[in-house]
Image (cartoon, helix red, strand yellow):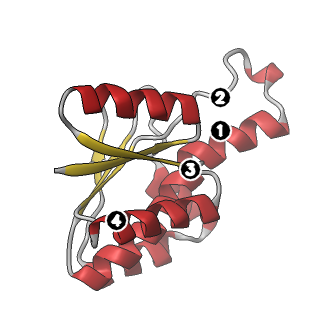
Amino acid sequence: MCRLVSGRHQDVGEQLTRELGDLGAQVEFVPADVRFDADVKNLVDRAVARFGRIDVAFNNAGTEGTPGPVTVVTDETYQATFDTNVKGTLLSLKHVFRIMGEQGGGSIVNVSSLTQPTCASLARLLQRLGHLGPLHSSVGRTGLPPRLVGP
């Protein structure tokens, strides 16, 4: 079975690919930063070009941001954390739903730490921001309910 892994740190991705290859896995690394729509779209499109379809998408990108008291949070550090933890999940859902809907199925797993329940609160956040309708209509149209794993 072939797998595709991704991340924004090229050196870490290449090392992971080598280690998994040494264990006999067929793995390809595609650099992408989940904060950017074009990167996520490219990642999904590369997966489809390589494998013909996407059966499983596993969203695991996340950051705790800048550790410390709230008084040290800046607009930039907050935005980087939000964009990785929330927007990254949303962008992945956006592009993976597109493919899985066309192919008639698949599974999406969103991982969130229970101490940082970003994915768990994604629906509440999107509802507050007025974006829950598009997510619900995507789920209803594709029949692909995203799953949440909170280790």
Label 2 to label 4, Cα distance in Å? 33 Å
Q: Residues within 10 Å of mark 3 (few under 14, many from 20)?
A: many
List the residue tagged with mark 4.
Answer: 50
Q: Along the polypeptide, which appears first: circle 2 or circle 1?
A: 2
The residue that mark 1 highlights is 81
Amino acid on which the number 3 mark rests in the picture? Ala
Query: What secondary structure is marked by label 1?
Result: helix
- The residue indicated by pointer 2 is 65
Q: Is residue 85 above or below residue 114?
A: below
What amino acid is at disc 4?
Arg
Task: Pick whichever of labels 4 and 3 is earlier in the sequence.
Answer: 3
> In the rendered view, would you say 18 is above or below 53?
above
For marks 3 and 2 on the same chain, the one whose residue lies earlier in the sequence: 3
- Secondary structure, mark 4, is helix
Q: Residue at x 25, y 26 (%)?
A: 22
Check disc 2 and report its element: helix, strand or loop. Answer: loop
Left or right of residue 1: residue 39: right
